[in-house]
Amino acid sequence: MKLNGFDDLQKRLSSIQKNAESLAGKRNVSFDVLFPDSFMTAHTKSPNIQSFLADLKVTDQQSFKDLPQKDLEQKVISETDFESWQDMMNTAGKKYYENHLFS
Protein backbone atom coordinates (compact mmCIF):
# COMPACT_ATOMS: atom_id res chain seq x y z
CA MET A 1 0.00 0.00 0.00
CA LYS A 2 1.38 3.39 -1.02
CA LEU A 3 0.98 6.35 1.33
CA ASN A 4 0.54 9.26 -1.06
CA GLY A 5 0.29 11.85 1.71
CA PHE A 6 3.71 10.92 3.03
CA ASP A 7 5.16 10.73 -0.47
CA ASP A 8 3.83 14.20 -1.22
CA LEU A 9 5.24 15.52 2.06
CA GLN A 10 8.63 13.98 1.31
CA LYS A 11 8.67 15.55 -2.18
CA ARG A 12 7.68 18.93 -0.76
CA LEU A 13 10.36 18.80 1.92
CA SER A 14 12.94 17.79 -0.68
CA SER A 15 11.92 20.75 -2.84
CA ILE A 16 12.21 23.14 0.11
CA GLN A 17 15.66 21.74 0.92
CA LYS A 18 16.85 22.26 -2.66
CA ASN A 19 15.48 25.81 -2.66
CA ALA A 20 17.19 26.54 0.67
CA GLU A 21 20.50 25.27 -0.70
CA SER A 22 20.17 27.52 -3.74
CA LEU A 23 19.52 30.53 -1.47
CA ALA A 24 22.47 29.85 0.83
CA GLY A 25 25.17 32.49 1.15
CA LYS A 26 25.17 36.16 0.30
CA ARG A 27 23.13 37.28 -2.67
CA ASN A 28 22.96 40.44 -4.73
CA VAL A 29 19.33 41.12 -5.53
CA SER A 30 18.23 44.08 -7.62
CA PHE A 31 15.71 46.53 -6.18
CA ASP A 32 13.22 45.44 -8.87
CA VAL A 33 13.36 41.89 -7.53
CA LEU A 34 13.57 42.78 -3.84
CA PHE A 35 10.73 45.31 -4.08
CA PRO A 36 8.26 43.89 -6.63
CA ASP A 37 5.30 46.04 -7.64
CA SER A 38 3.00 43.95 -5.43
CA PHE A 39 5.16 44.77 -2.39
CA MET A 40 5.29 48.45 -3.24
CA THR A 41 1.54 48.84 -3.77
CA ALA A 42 0.83 46.95 -0.55
CA HIS A 43 3.22 48.97 1.63
CA THR A 44 3.81 52.35 -0.04
CA LYS A 45 2.07 55.14 -1.91
CA SER A 46 4.08 54.25 -5.04
CA PRO A 47 3.32 51.65 -7.71
CA ASN A 48 6.95 50.51 -7.99
CA ILE A 49 10.41 51.10 -6.56
CA GLN A 50 11.48 53.36 -9.44
CA SER A 51 8.57 55.69 -8.79
CA PHE A 52 9.28 55.63 -5.06
CA LEU A 53 12.90 56.68 -5.61
CA ALA A 54 12.26 59.10 -8.49
CA ASP A 55 11.24 61.96 -6.17
CA LEU A 56 14.64 61.59 -4.52
CA LYS A 57 16.38 61.90 -7.90
CA VAL A 58 17.63 58.32 -7.73
CA THR A 59 18.22 56.99 -11.23
CA ASP A 60 21.02 54.48 -10.72
CA GLN A 61 23.16 52.77 -8.11
CA GLN A 62 25.51 55.73 -7.72
CA SER A 63 22.74 58.28 -7.18
CA PHE A 64 21.27 55.95 -4.55
CA LYS A 65 24.66 55.74 -2.79
CA ASP A 66 24.93 59.54 -2.90
CA LEU A 67 21.45 60.05 -1.46
CA PRO A 68 21.50 61.50 2.07
CA GLN A 69 20.21 58.83 4.45
CA LYS A 70 17.95 61.35 6.20
CA ASP A 71 16.12 62.05 2.91
CA LEU A 72 15.49 58.36 2.35
CA GLU A 73 14.36 57.83 5.94
CA GLN A 74 11.93 60.76 5.74
CA LYS A 75 10.41 59.39 2.53
CA VAL A 76 10.00 55.95 4.08
CA ILE A 77 8.35 57.39 7.19
CA SER A 78 5.99 59.65 5.27
CA GLU A 79 5.04 57.35 2.38
CA THR A 80 5.19 53.78 3.67
CA ASP A 81 3.94 51.70 6.55
CA PHE A 82 7.54 51.17 7.75
CA GLU A 83 9.45 53.01 10.46
CA SER A 84 12.78 53.02 8.60
CA TRP A 85 14.53 52.06 5.36
CA GLN A 86 16.14 49.14 7.23
CA ASP A 87 12.69 47.93 8.33
CA MET A 88 11.45 48.16 4.73
CA MET A 89 14.46 46.23 3.41
CA ASN A 90 14.18 43.57 6.12
CA THR A 91 10.51 42.97 5.34
CA ALA A 92 11.17 42.84 1.60
CA GLY A 93 14.09 40.46 2.14
CA LYS A 94 12.01 38.16 4.31
CA LYS A 95 9.27 38.04 1.67
CA TYR A 96 11.86 37.42 -1.06
CA TYR A 97 13.28 34.41 0.79
CA GLU A 98 9.84 33.07 1.70
CA ASN A 99 8.72 33.29 -1.93
CA HIS A 100 11.83 31.52 -3.20
CA LEU A 101 12.02 28.93 -0.44
CA PHE A 102 8.44 27.73 -0.82
CA SER A 103 8.09 28.09 -4.59
Image (tube, helix red, strand yellow):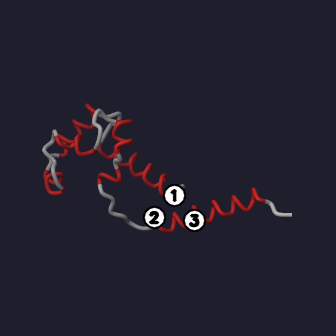
Which residue extends farthest right?
1
**Residue 26 screen position, x and y as percent:** 38, 66
Using the rendered view, name the quadrant where residue 11 is placed: bottom right
Q: What residue is at 63 percent from the left and 60 percent from the top?
A: 12
Do the CB atoms of the residues marked 2 and 1 lie less than 8 Å apart? yes
Mark-to-mark CA distance, 1 and 3? 8 Å
Residue where numbered disc 1 is placed: 101
Q: Quadrant of residue 18?
A: bottom right
Q: Residue at x 52, y 64 (%)?
A: 19
Looking at the rendered structure, the kind of residue marked 3 is Gln
Q: CA distance from mark 2 to mark 1?
A: 8 Å
Of pointers 1 and 3, the one earlier in the residue sequence: 3
Q: Could you tell me which secondary element the residue under label 3 belongs to?
A: helix
Q: Position of residue 1 (x, y in %)?
A: 86, 64
**Where 5 sits versus 35, above or below?**
below
How many numbered discs sit on the rendered protein?
3
Residue at screen point 30% across, 52% down: 32
Q: In x, y percent, where is residue 60?
A: 17, 54
Q: Earlier in the sequence, mark 2 or mark 1?
A: 2
Q: Is residue 12 above or below residue 55?
A: below
Q: Residues within 10 Å of mark 1 (few under 14, many from 20)?
A: some
* Residue density around tag 2, few if under 14, some if 14–19, many if 20 or more, within 10 Å: few
Task: Find numbered disc 1 in the image and state the secondary structure of the residue it sits on.
Answer: helix
Element marked by disc 2 = helix
Amino acid type, residue under disc 2 in the picture: Leu
Name the residue beneath numbered marker 3. 17
In the rendered structure, which disc, 3 or 2, sits on the residue that comes first in sequence? 3
The amino acid type, in three-letter code, at marker 1 is: Leu
Which residue is under mark 2? 23
Front in this rendered view, residue 89 or 10: 10
